[in-house]
Image (tube, rainbow, N blue to C red):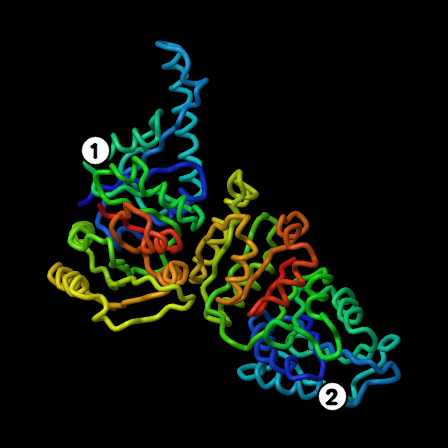
Amino acid sequence: MKKALLCLDENLASSIALRYADCIPDLIETDIYLIHVEEPDKRQQAGTGWVRRTMEKGIKELGREAVQRLLRTEKVKFRFKGAPNIVVGDREREILFELKVGEYDLYIEGNVSTPNPAEFFDLVTSKLYSKAPCPILMVKNLAVNNRVALLCGDGVDHDLLVGSFLHLTDNRDVEVDMVFYKFQEKNEISFLDRKEGGSDLEAVEKALLEGGKQIKGCHVVSGTPEVVGDYLKDFAFVASTLPTRKSPRMEVMANTPVSLLLCH
Amino acid sequence: MRILTAMDSHSYSRDIIPDVARLAANTWADLTLLGVQQDKNGPDRKMVEAMMSYQDELLAHVNREETLYEPISSADLKETGKGTWQASSRGRKKLTICLRAGDALKSILAQAEDEESDLLILGCTRGFDCEWENELGLPQKVAKEANCSVLVIKEQKKASQISSFLDQTNVSQQSLELINQLVTLHDAGLKIVGLKGQKGLIGKEDVEKKMMELLKYYNERKISAWIKMVDMENLEDYVVTATREGIVALWVGKKSLLSKIFSRDLVGKLVSRSQSSILILR
């Protein structure tokens, strides 16, 4: 059984992530633990000793209430492991600490930002994303089916992608599509011959089949990041390696409304 | 639900019948077919013929499995007011055929007002014109001026996507159902688009809650729905792009910022610039 950590705040992104958790067992065999980080403002960080401890206790209690409210509102069927872990401190630092100490296999958080590539780039190169010791599932929307896609193309470490994907989904009968992306300044999606995916695509296919996965489709697609991002919307999630530089593939990931499994 | 369909004797009015029929059948709506004419002296023969032919086509679509509407004969048309002739039938739901003489815009708006219509549907020419013959800018004016929701059907092609823009919480059950029906009719996906300003999502927590409710509402009905955020500064471009993919639905209620951004003039502009059908939800 894998271990996943889901970070909750009282907002739309967390509501979506929480409800998405209902479909995760079909895709990944995992226990899900909850964490909520309350970031005190400067005024609240003032003081030492008893004053500070009392202040932190109060902040923690507020955080606990917020998470309970969210859980009550969303009424998810999924049974989370243990009580939510409420922590006071810097969000990135506390989550990274928990991921390392708890030896998690997956970090999950909701995200409903705009498709602005610069904003997305800042997020995926943030300390939390780049230093996370496990793959990250960025939940953008609810899943409509159990099919997932592996987004391949230039800049993707295909061995790492397939390895992480197989590790997470090893006991699950997940249907996989391979999508190889080629940038083209065209507002319509084009499906190219699979030869255009080259040896990388063949290697991915071979590794997936060896890993016991059923491959439902293999598509070499080209178009602008907007149209290809939209094309991916029917998958439960799209897996790819964490982008480390700005590229058309990164823009596809920024644009797609579907959840992303970011491996690194 | 009360649907009013405004028609003239041109082909774009005939082209919308399959969509009107499916919407009416799926919502079990009371339906009025309104024909507008110039002659105030009596029902225009050409217009009456067109309306009867529209009715035949409509009933052939709607009454395939069960009889929802009973047919109306042209002889039943009676003057109900100055320059207004009307006849109704009572099947499972009420069907009305009405002819109004005079200014087309005023006639359509007056009928919608009199009937307290929930949805006003009209067709228009294709491309960047979106016109009615001899009635400059009529669809745009109707979309701007009507107090109820308006669906301008521009092309008879299947929409792959319905993009509905939301910046307020005042969303009626009927407008949700309308979106629901459009998604079903076109077998399309639904994007619930939120607007982000400099201080984050417009409408903040209330809109967040409403978006989540909508997402759940449609997902529970097995409708593929996605939330998408758009920066305010890119809104107009995004709307134009969305019209290429499918139908754009704008909730322009009184509290809506959209109604300020898409001022009534801009709603008209959007209707003419759109490459697909537009649904204005009020």
Q: Is residue A209 left or right of residue B97?
A: left
For residue A171, say whether it is visible. no
Q: How many marks?
A: 2
For residue B122, say whether it is visible. yes
Residue corresponding to mark 1: A100
Measured as percent of width and height from the top left, residue B269 is found at 65, 63
Q: Amino acid at mark 2?
A: Ser
Q: Nearer the viewer, residue A121 or B176?
A: A121
Callouts 1 and 2 close, C-beta under 8 Å: no
Q: Nearer the viewer, residue A119 or A132?
A: A119
Q: The numbered mark 1 sits on a residue in which chain? A: A
Q: Is residue B116 above or below residue B260?
A: below
- Mark 1, secondary structure of its residue: helix
Measured as percent of width and height from the top left, residue B187 is found at 46, 70
* Residue for point 36% across, 14% down: A53
Residue corresponding to mark 2: B73
Circle nearer the viewer, 1 or 2? 1
Residue A42, by quadrant, is: top left
* Residue at the front extreme, as displayed: A185
- Mark 2, secondary structure of its residue: loop
Q: Nearer the viewer, residue A182 or B118?
A: A182
Q: Is residue B259 left or right of residue B114?
A: left
The quadrant of the picture occupied by the C terminus of chain B is: bottom right
Residue B52, by quadrant, is: bottom right
Residue A190, by quadrant, is: bottom left
Q: Amino acid at mark 1?
A: Lys
> Residue A29 got which mark?
none
